[in-house]
Image (tube, rainbow, N blue to C red):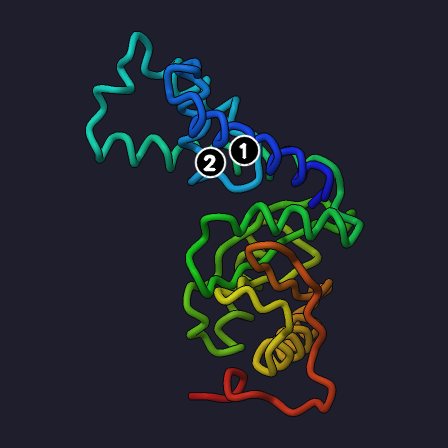
Amino acid sequence: MNKDDYNIHKDHRNRMRAKLKRCGADAFDAYQLIEMLLFHTIPRKDTNPPAHRLLELYPDGGLLRANEEEMTALLRLSRDTVLRLICDSLSKEPMESDFSRRAYLYIWFIAKPAGCVGAMFLDSHDKLLECSLLSSGRMFRCENYVDKITDIARKCGAKKVILCHNHINGDKNPSMEDRFLTECISRNLSEAGLEYLGHYIVTASDCIYCPGCKNGVESECCTQK
């Protein structure tokens, strides 16, 4: 993520909140109030476009008459739409660089539930074909991941795979289980004829590369029945 972009959005949000506290809601246009409401569902991104979109969907004050269930669904849809559009934009070019992969995965994991494991599937030229959620909760054995990955790769014609998962506690350091899973997946995908490009860990503030285990010992996640 570009640090300058983050600072711009952070300063804008702080100014908006300070103005709201100082002047009240009457000092804002309707779209600006919706924009601030979206601060809570779309972190660190420009919420101006989805705010305008919501008002277009519910013109003439219709948004104010939406019930709680409709409002919740609208906010989630607005957030998910923005995230999808950003991911689509990032995936237009081949993901040859570490930076492009990190940027995509950071956005893709926003709003995902805790403990998710996913995989990026690329063609021989590093063009992203698909990014799929493999599990939520990290309960699978290594072999289960390999089976799911090879099946998806076969269906979409992928030649390369990137493993990814999110940490719920914000810890950027790979656990021993993370390292073992990296080593296990890498070995098995190679045997399946797929090129393994690495494993990334995503937190609320970063995306880091996860190395494999150093001693070649398999973890419980690779051997449990």
The residue sitting at 39% across, 33% down in the picture is 77
Q: In the rendered view, tell whether residue 38 sits above or below residue 52.
A: below
- Residue 143 percent across, percent down from the top left: 52, 77
The residue sitting at 42% across, 57% down in the picture is 113
Tell me, yes or no, if residue 61 can be seen here: yes
From the image, state whether disc 2 or disc 1 is nearer to you: 1
**C-alpha separation, residue under disc 2 versus residue under disc 1:** 8 Å
Q: Is residue 57 left or right of residue 6?
A: left
Dot 2: few (<14), some (14–19), or many (≥20) neighbours within 10 Å?
some
Direction front: furthest residue: 22
The residue beneath circle 2 is 39
Pick the quarter of the image with the N terminus.
top right
Q: Which amino acid type corresponds to the residue marked 2 in the rendered image?
A: Phe
Pick the quarter of the image with the C terminus.
bottom left
SS at mark 2 in the image = helix
Q: Are marks 2 and 1 in contact (CB under 8 Å)?
A: yes
* 4 or 83, nearer to the observer: 4
- Residue 8 percent across, percent down from the top left: 66, 33
Query: Which image quadrant for residue 138?
Result: bottom left
Tell me, yes or no, if residue 80 can be seen here: no
Direction top: furthest residue: 60
The residue sitting at 74% across, 86% down in the picture is 214
The residue beneath circle 1 is 13
- Residue 159 percent across, percent down from the top left: 70, 56
* Mark toward the start of the polypeptide (2 vs 1): 1
